[in-house]
Amino acid sequence: MIASLTIVASGAADGNGYIKCMIEDAELIDDDTTQDQGGSGNPIQIVDGYGCGYSSKNDIVAYNDVDFGANGAQAMDLLFGYGHNDGSVTTLSFMLDDPSSAPIATAEIGFTGGGEIANAGWVRVPMTIPAGVHTVYVQFTNEKSGSISDIVFEEAPEAPAASVDTSASPDTAT
């Protein structure tokens, strides 16, 4: 059974080329059939000092209705905590608008110093998100748990204006 806690997330460009989304505004989608695969047997949830905690395989953090403006985004910076100092990594997939769609990006994140926000590190994930309003899904894809705090999308550069070649003009008949 899949359970979800819905909180409407809305991000918008801040005027400096960044779109910030807070974990408190995300929708947490728990796959309760995998709670023993990375989590502590608890559903994914907001945990003080950690951001989203108790993540396990197949759990999803969804950022709904994020406005990527006219340019879209070219990367995501993810504040992520991972506490296993054993050479292992947690793996994430990022989907756009449909959690069952093909990933637009993936990431492997190793030890950051701990799962707490105080030990989290910023991880940059290049991705292309088109202009407009979209939902971004972040899915844990292995049994190694980690904590997402906040995400910041970097706005894509403005597309160059189409130029019109005026150097060759048609002959005018008189």
Image (cartoon, rainbow, N blue to C red):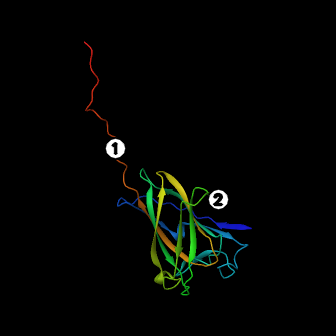
Q: Nearer the viewer, residue 142 or 153?
A: 142
Instruction: Tell me the SS state at disc 2.
Output: loop
Where residue 163 sits in the image (x, y, percent)?
32, 39
Which one is earlier in the sequence, the residue at label 1 or at label 2? 2
* 42 is higher (above) or lower (below) than 98: below
Q: Which residue is mark 2?
A: 100
Residue 19 versus residue 174 in the image, above or below: below
The residue that appears at 43% across and 52% down in the rendered structure is 69
Q: Which residue is mark 1?
A: 161
Lateral position of residue 69 relative to residue 2, left or right? left
Where residue 113 appears, as percent x and y from the top left, is 49, 85
Q: Residues within 10 Å of mark 2 (few under 14, many from 20)?
A: few
* Residue 125 coordinates in the image, percent (x, y): 47, 67
Amino acid type assigned to the residue bearing label 1 in the image: Ala
- Label 1: few (<14), some (14–19) or many (≥20) C-alpha neighbours in 10 Å: few
- Picture quarter containing residue 95? bottom right
C-alpha span from label 1 to label 2: 35 Å
- Closer to the camera, 4 or 170? 170
Question: Where does the image place residue 88, in percent across and percent down from the top left?
Answer: 57, 82
Image quarter where the N terminus lies is: bottom right
